[in-house]
Amino acid sequence: MNRHIRAGIMMAGLVSVASCQTMETTRGGEVGVDRRQQATFLTPSAPEVDAAARQQYAEIIAEARKAGTLNRDTRQVERVRNITQRLIPHTKVFRDDAPGWQWEVNVLSSDQINAWCMPGGKMAVYTGIIDKLELTDAELAAIMGHEIAHALREHARERMGRQQTAGIGLAVVEILSGVRLGNLGGTLANAMFVLPNSRENEQEGDRIGVELAARAGYDPRAAITLWQKMTAQGGGQPPQWLSTHPSHQTRISDLETYAERVMPLYRQATAAR
């Protein structure tokens, strides 16, 4: 048998075996996020990932404190934390353990338009995204809900398993074929095994995020205006099939659909306040 064919069969077999497991992280919620999440024999355990996240977060916060970029504006910090505290109780809709996580959120002074939530509820919002986009509370809730969703779904842990499997598969092809694929092989592995999952992750984050915001009494349609603002920031974007994020047009269209789906939850929440 041709060694190139043999290498392809070997890689396909490896990916098939590695992908046959699933992990259940969340319930679907009103938005119905119920994709069967893949786990491989290389996927680290949730406690391992959470411990690594706590350590990394502590290092980031320590560095920010040393640099004088940690929580410089007390009113801004209070605003971010108040919004987060309204969102956290509603994580129970998706998983029972989440409200009891050791949640922490800080504001980092940086021009970056960014925010994130590590596994286990360790969060950061950058001043750049608040100031440059002139965010309303509802838009900020959309961002925080989206980032919290990544932690709820354990996207980082899922992605780590996929990346490890893709790396081994590439190594097998190179060994059996005798051809060094280099950057081209890395790009192919990413496009096949990593990036499509990342686009799914972003979509799941958007959908869960609007539901969390709606349940907390924030207008879920703010997620749409948020991404309109992001689009207005300009800058090039790679083709959707080779990107870790959906295109702006795709994202806004999906948000319109799911924001409307959770509007009854928003109306119920605001009526109860």
Image (cartoon, rainbow, N blue to C red):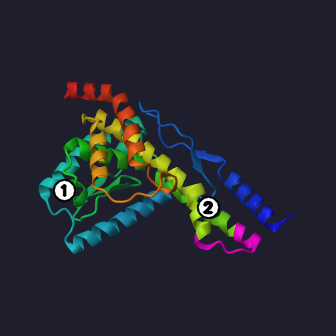
178 inside magenta stretch: yes
55 inside magenta stretch: no
Q: Quadrant of residue 130?
A: bottom left
Q: Is residue 12 above or below residue 212?
A: below
On the image, numbered disc 2 is attached to which residue? 166
Q: Tell me the residue at 36%/46% (across/down).
A: 146
**Dot 1 crowding, Cα within 10 Å, few <14, some 14–19, many 20+:** few
Q: Main secondary structure of the magenta part?
A: helix
Residue 262 horizontal side relative to residue 157, left or right: left
Residue 72 point in image, percent of width and height: 15, 63
What type is the residue that disc 1 sits on?
Asp
Callout 2: SS: helix
Mark toward the viewer: 2 or 1: 1
153 vs 142, nearest the viewer: 142
Residue 34 point in image, percent of width and height: 51, 37
Q: Tell me the residue at 25%/44% (across/down).
A: 139
Residue 215 point in image, percent of width and height: 30, 33
Q: Is residue 151 above or below residue 268?
A: below
Q: Is residue 16 visible?
A: yes
On the image, numbered disc 1 is attached to which residue? 131
199 vs 74, nearest the viewer: 199
Q: Tell me the residue at 58%/71% (across/down).
A: 183
Residue 203 horizontal side relative to residue 60, left or right: right
Q: Tell me the residue at 19%/56% (across/down).
A: 131
Which segment did they paint magenta? 173-183
Q: CA distance from mark 2 to mark 1?
A: 39 Å
Q: Earlier in the sequence, mark 2 or mark 1?
A: 1
What type is the residue that disc 2 sits on?
Ala
208 vs 186, nearest the viewer: 186
Name the quadrant of the C terminus: top left
